[in-house]
Amino acid sequence: MPETFTSATNGPDDDAPFRSRLSFDLDVDICVVGAGLAGLTVALEAARRGASVAVLEGRHVGWNASGHQLGTVMPGYSLPIGDLIERVGLEDARELWALSKEGVDYVRAAATDEAMPGIALSEGALEVSNVDAGETLISRLQMLSEDFETEVEGWQVDRVRDQLGTGRYFHGVYYPRAFQIDGRKYIHGLAAQAKRAGARIFEDTPVVSIDPSGIRKRIVTPSARLRASHIVLAGNVHLGAPLRRLSETLLPVWRYAAVTEPLGERLGEVIAFRGSVTDSDGIDHFRIVDGDRLMWASPETTWEARPHRFGPAIQRRIATVFPKLGKAPISQVFGGAVGVTVHGMPQIGQLRKGLWVASGFGRQGLNTSAMAGQVIARSILWGEDRWKLFSPFELVWAGGATGRAAGHLIGLWARGQSAAAGALARYREG
């Protein structure tokens, strides 16, 4: 069971263009710290609009979670839609939801085979419930369709189980406009497009210190200094010492996934649905890749571990949900750390004049990082102020080591509750 940090579907991008370390002093309009999904989108959109942009990355493009995710693209946020309305009101919730849909449209427009060869786009996403929640489903469908103008379909139990050969799931919500792509191809495609647009990307260039005061902000790296009118902090939980207080507003969460060996025709006999599947409790996330292999994400922890340790746990989970597949042999295991906010919404906006943040995308999805890149680039260059929609979601300390321990225990409790609720629902059905 080898450990890998490559693309889950197409292997490593060996032909990714080399980007050198910053070794000379530089003046630019915008400096982006972090070459993940959000940072590269900011760089691409700003460079397209004529700004001079430098991206500083401490390791290499897409080395962490941005390059190691399942590639599902659908509208929404981690915060449940009912809680979002309660927090900001219906009108602002609709505005925020519309922004998340813009993020979906952005990725769809960018992720074409012409622009990003091998992107492997496939359609449709299904969210399933492990309890019988018919009345809740109807209410949610009406809200999404009528209030939030989102194309959705409700799937009854029979249809869900016809597509997914397991008795563990009941109702489902199908998003026909959602899709999935090869996430690693996408992030390297973003980097290539940003470079062609004029952005300069410097890998192996960690930021030692930042001075955000004054009109021209100053950034120090181990081998050079940089000045910029605007700094965009897109380093997530890896900002480290230069901005420790900001990175401590995120709870680091490591999510691990695996890809099975080819399973042949029996995989299609058990799982007919070819889009992404997530359960409503956020525990399982899976889809078929390469025709007859299953990619599955399940374990989550607030402490870093070697990914290969989670291969057996994922194997057992697959066998539990789909007994007909048995212990599917695992080919690859990969993972990465994401930053999760206390309030469940991303961090997008201006911290002080010329200092911006695009972070906290853990459990949010590809659409939010794409949307954040557009919003911040347009705010800097055009003066748009839609970032203020995120102002109610302030920077909240995530609790440090205590918060991580609490997060781990809460995760265990939530998985236990979900398992108990599902078992009770199946017992009642029987």
Image: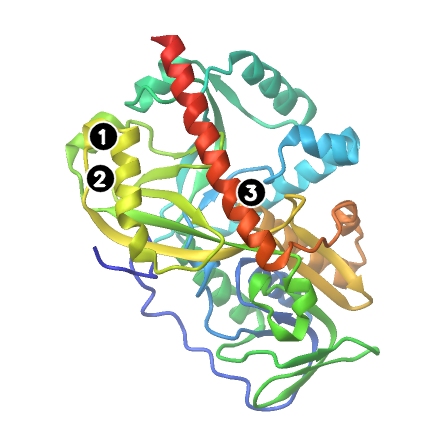
Labels 1 and 2: the sequence-earlier one: 1
| Alpha-carbon span between mark 2 and mark 3 | 27 Å
Q: Is residue 297 left or right of residue 198?
A: left
Local crowd at mark 3 within 10 Å, few (<14), some, or many (≥20)?
many
For badge 3, the amino acid type reads Val
Q: Quadrant of the C terminus?
A: top left
For badge 2, the amino acid type reads Asp
The foreground one among 416 and 49 is 416
Does residue 116 appear anywhere in the picture? no
Q: Which residue is mark 2?
A: 292
| Alpha-carbon span between mark 1 and mark 2 | 7 Å
x then y, percent, for residue 257: 35, 48
Q: Which residue is mark 3?
A: 104
Q: Quadrant of the N terminus?
A: bottom left
Q: Which mark is residue 119?
A: none
| Alpha-carbon span between mark 1 and mark 3 | 28 Å
Does residue 61 appear anywhere in the picture? yes
Q: Is residue 260 left or right of residue 169?
A: left
x then y, percent, for residue 162: 31, 18
For badge 1, the amino acid type reads Gly
Which numbered mark, 1 or 3, is in the foreground of this view? 1
CB atoms of marks 1 and 2 within 8 Å: yes
